[in-house]
Image: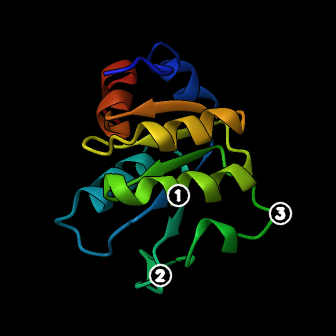
Amino acid sequence: MDSYDEERIPEILKKAKTVAVVGISDKPDRDSYRVASYLRDAGYTIIPVNPVIGQWNGIKSYDSLLSIPSSVKVDVVDVFRKPDAAIDVAKEASNLKPYAVWFQEGVINKEAAEVAKKSGSLVVMDRCMMKEHSRHFGKR
């Protein structure tokens, strides 16, 4: 496993205010739902991104990262997609210039990581944002 910006995880978690959750589910038993709920409860603004749901917990869901209004500053793109779809997400994310692109556990795609890095974003791969937040800052 290549090292990306894991040593900067606490910094990413502190600086981030807005998290676009790509592949979020409206089903409470799914990891993406639980992680987004945790992050929201920890004080982050969640931007749901999933073309098959209209909303997540009363928050409008966007079809893609590109459909998020330009007036919204996305700090972290949190990716809950299969590894083979991660490259397209990274390409879309490069247009938003987020502080970090975070590929959740099991989402390993080196090409996607390189696309995100080349656009200036920090990259975390194969880590859970909820687990890392809890580990560094305690449960909220």
The answer to whether 38 is drawn above or below residue 6 in the figure is: below
According to the picture, the residue beneath numbered tag 3 turns out to be 71
According to the picture, the residue beneath numbered tag 1 turns out to be 89
The residue type indicated by label 1 comes to: Val
According to the picture, the residue beneath numbered tag 2 turns out to be 51
Q: Position of residue 140 (x, y in %)?
A: 35, 36
Question: Where does the N terminus fall, quadrant-wise?
Answer: top left
> Which residue extends farthest right?
71
The answer to whether 82 is drawn above or below residue 8 in the figure is: below
Identify the residue shown where x is 41% and y is 74%. 57
Q: Position of residue 92 (x, y in %)?
A: 63, 59
Label 3 Cα neighbours within 10 Å, binned few <14 / some 14-19 / many ≥20: few
Identify the residue shown where x is 47% and y is 12%. 7
Horizontal side of 125 relative to 118 (left or right) equals left
Taking depth in this image into account, of 123 and 111 the one nearest to the observer is 111
Comparing marks 3 and 2, which lies closer to the viewer? 2
